[in-house]
Amino acid sequence: MSSFLIAPSILSADFARLGDDVANVLAAGADVVHFDVMDNHFVPNLTFGPMICQSLRDYGITAPIDVHLMVKQVDSLIPGFARAGADIITFHPEASDHIDRTLQLIKDHGCKAGLVLNPATPLHCLDFVMDKLDVILLMSVNPGFGGQSFIPTTLDKLRLVKERIIASGRDIRLQVDGGVKADNIAEIAAAGADMFVAGSAIFSKPDYKLAIDEMRSELAK
Ligand code: DX5
Ligand code: ZN
C-alpha cells in the first residue's frame, strides 16, 4: 500500500450491482472501501448496515473496509460490523455518550478506531483520546450526501490536526471526506491528509482507473 490511501465512498456506487462496482473500483487501483452508514437520524439520509458489509465479504471483496458511522446509536452497531468484516470503524463524537468507551469497544472487537469531526466540530474532543486513535477523519462537507463541494476552511483544520498527530508521536491516519477531487487533492495532501475519501469524483466517471490515476498523479507532483 502506498502512503497515500484512496478510499472510494460506495455511497456513489451503483447499489443494484454493488459487488461488481466495488470489485471494479478496487481493480482500478483503490486501496480501501469507504462504507458510509447513515440512519436518517444523525444525518438526513439512509444507507446500509452490517449485512451489506457481510455481503461484500461473501462476494469476495478482501480489501480493507472503512466503516464511517453516521448514526446515533453507535455502540450497538460495532460488534455486528466487526463480525461482518470491517477493518476500520469511525464515528462522530456527537453520536456517542462515552467517546473513550466507544473507541475502546471498537478496538476490543479487533478493528482500528477513529473519530470523525464535522466541519464545525472543534478539535478539543481529540484531547485525552489521542492514544486510542488510529484514524482521524475530517469532514470537508456536512455529512449526509455525496456530491457536495469541499469546504475550504478544512485546509486550516487539517494543518492543526496534523500538528497534533505529529506532537502525539503516534501513527494516526489523517483522512478527509467530502468534495475531494483530482483538482484539489494535492492541496489537501499538502495540508496534511494522507487518506482521501472520494465518492462522486470516482463513481461518476466512466473509467475508474483514469479517475484514480489522475488523483495519484496529482499526489505525486
Ligand atoms: C458524506 C459521506 C462521504 C461522501 C463523499 O456524508 O461521508 O463519504 O460519500 O462523497 P463525495 O466524494 O461525492 O463528496
Ligand atoms: Zn464518509
Image (cartoon, grey):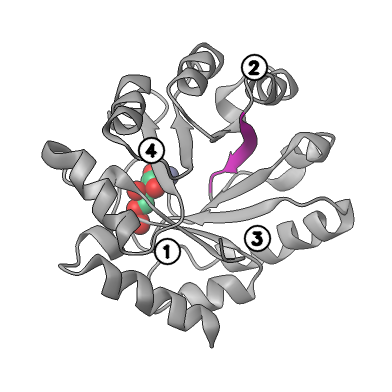
The disc, 4 or 2, on the residue closer to the chain's N-terminal end is 4
The residue sitting at the front extreme is 60
Residue at 38% in and 64% down: 29
Judging by the rendered image, the residue that carries numbered circle 3 is 157
Q: State yes or no: discs 3 and 4 in contact (Cβ < 8 Å).
A: no
Viewer-side label of 4, 2: 4
Label 1 – label 3 distance at C-alpha: 13 Å
Residue at 39% in and 79% down: 183
Q: Position of residue 144 (x, y in %)?
A: 35, 40
The residue sitting at the left extreme is 16
Could you tell me the amino acid type at mark 3?
Lys
The disc, 3 or 2, on the residue closer to the chain's N-terminal end is 2
The reply to whether the residue tagged 4 has its Cβ within 8 angstroms of ligand 2 is yes
Q: State yes or no: discs 3 and 2 in contact (Cβ < 8 Å).
A: no
Quadrant in which the N terminus appears: bottom right
Could you tell me the amino acid type at mark 4?
Asp
Q: Which mark is residue 36?
A: 4
Q: State yes or no: discs 1 and 3 in contact (Cβ < 8 Å).
A: no
Please say whether residue 116 is one of the residues in the magenta stretch. Answer: yes
Could you tell me which secondary element the residue under label 3 belongs to? helix
The disc, 3 or 4, on the residue closer to the chain's N-terminal end is 4
Could you tell me the amino acid type at mark 2?
Asp
Q: Which residues are magenta?
A: 111-118
Label 1 – label 2 distance at C-alpha: 29 Å
Could you tell me which secondary element the residue under label 1 belongs to? loop
Q: Which mark is residue 97?
A: 2
Label 3 – label 4 distance at C-alpha: 22 Å
